[in-house]
Amino acid sequence: SQQENDKQLAAQAAVALLADGMTVGLGTGSTATAALHAIAARKLSITGVPTSRQTAELAMALGIPLADINEVPHIDITLDGADEFTVSLDLIKGGGGALLHEKIVAVRSRQLVIMTDASKLVERLGKFRVPVEVIPFAVRYVQEQIAGMGAACTVRPDVVTDEGNLIVDADFGLVESPSALGARLKSITGVVEHGIFAGIATLVFMGDNGTVRRFPQ
Ligand code: DER
């Protein structure tokens, strides 16, 4: 499909930034998967730091050497997807349920490069619900607190994260201030992390009907 082709174009543009010897954060989702295949196809010799068990298994199958995040001195660059992004590089991530490890790898990376197709570009975050990772013991309390903020929220059925937590998807409508909403969510007891990535991404490649646009332009 055009969307798959555009994701592939964005992944190729991001992989072109890699060099042998780099330590590379490996994202989760279909676009990150395309990037993994591109890394293997180009026979790049990098050390990968996976953002999910799913990504680790694919990387191993592709022969990409992996390291534990706590064993590497730094991460040069991370390639990952997003569910939504704005021109100021605020993101919503977590559609694939890996937002906690994705954010830990992202914040420890010198560069966070996001790869998307044009459907992810929005004026303002919030069309996509905000994923929130919650300790199971706290899930009812967290839902009550989020409801008290005026947002409808549901626990993602049949999903337990790599850390054994639950994911709640919260509908805040269009988000006025991503960083402010993120801070409020983090302050709720029992919330581990959320899918608002504000001020973390350094570059977005967006495939758009056969071409690739980059943000900031
Ligand atoms: O779950 C995630 O954060 C993924 O990166 C997701 O947001 C993007 O998935 P896609 O590349 O399959 O669209």
Image (cartoon, rainbow, N blue to C red):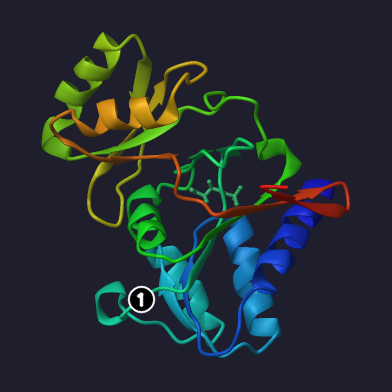
Q: Which of the 4 quarters of the picture holds residue 125?
A: top right
Front residue of 152/120: it is 120
Q: Position of residue 193 (x, y in %)?
A: 28, 42
Q: Is residue 72 above or below residue 208?
A: below
Query: Quick one: label 1, few (<14), some, or many (20+) residues within 10 Å?
Result: some
Identified by mark 1, the residue type is: His
Front residue of 47/37: it is 47
Secondary structure state at the residue bearing disc 1: loop
Q: Is residue 15 above or below residue 113?
A: below
Question: Ligand 1: does it lie within 8 Å of the C-beta at label 1?
Answer: no
Number of labels in the image equals 1
Q: Which residue is mark 1?
A: 74
Q: Is residue 130 left or right of residue 104?
A: right
Q: Which of the 4 quarters of the picture holds residue 106?
A: bottom left
Q: Position of residue 130 (x, y in %)?
A: 42, 30
Q: Which of the 4 quarters of the picture holds residue 67?
A: bottom left
Q: Position of residue 114 (x, y in %)?
A: 59, 54
Residue at point 35% right, 25% down?
181
Q: Is residue 90 above or below residue 217?
A: above
Front residue of 50/61: it is 50
Residue at point 48% right, 43% down?
93
**Farthest front residue in view:** 217
Residue at point 66% right, 72% down?
15
Q: Position of residue 140 (x, y in %)?
A: 17, 23
Q: Is residue 196 above or below residue 103?
A: above
Residue at point 35% right, 63% down?
108
